[in-house]
Image: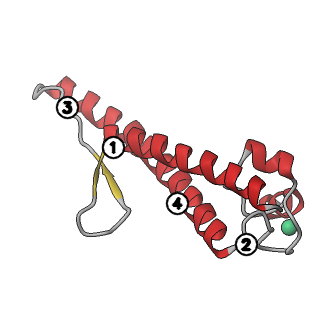
Amino acid sequence: MNKKTIEKYKKILEEKEKQITKDLEQIAEKNRHIKGDYKARFPHIGTHQDENANEIADYESLLSTEQNIEVDLVAIKKALERIEKGTYGVCEKCGKEINQKRLDAFPEANFCIDCEKNKKK
Ligand SMILES: [Zn+2]
């Protein structure tokens, strides 16, 4: 992959990272003890019993959203690290170049489409 193409993906990834970090900060707080870890905020709707039940339901959905975002963020950070190392766009499993169409749709991909399919089996 040439430098220009890598630069393009780097920009996309950096934009994505910014956006996702923003999303995450809306629903979660930074964990002061673990760098890069976030903790979902517990919503406070009210103190009545039915309100407490709503809070728990909200918190559970928030927690899964938060975890999904965190997984995405880690994948993006890893992709940016691979750009720095010069291994971006190469499948971590078989060492082949990842198809650019796949990278356009999923720039944080670390496996080629074949290895990704095999992983899910
Ligand atoms: Zn592969």
* SS for callout 1: helix
Q: CA distance from mark 1 to mark 2?
A: 30 Å
Asked whether, in this view, residue 86 is left or right of residue 35, the answer is right
Badge 1 is on which residue? 25
Badge 3 is on which residue? 52
Q: Amino acid at mark 1?
A: Glu
Q: Residues within 10 Å of mark 2 (few under 14, many from 20)?
A: some
In which quadrant of the rendered view does residue 41 lie? top left
Q: CA distance from mark 2 to mark 3?
A: 49 Å
* Of callouts 1 and 4, the N-terminal one: 1
* Of callouts 2 and 4, the N-terminal one: 4
* Of callouts 2 and 3, the N-terminal one: 3
Give the label on residue 74, or none. 4
Which of 105/60 is in front?
105
Which quadrant does the N terminus fall into? bottom right
Badge 2 is on which residue? 87
Q: CA distance from mark 1 to mark 3?
A: 23 Å
Q: Residue at x 70, y 49 (%)?
A: 8
Q: CA distance from mark 2 to mark 4?
A: 17 Å
Residue 62 seen in the figure: yes
* Of callouts 1 and 2, the N-terminal one: 1
Q: Amino acid at mark 3?
A: Asn
Pointer 2 and pointer 4: residues touching (CB < 8 Å)?
no
Q: Amino acid at mark 2?
A: Thr
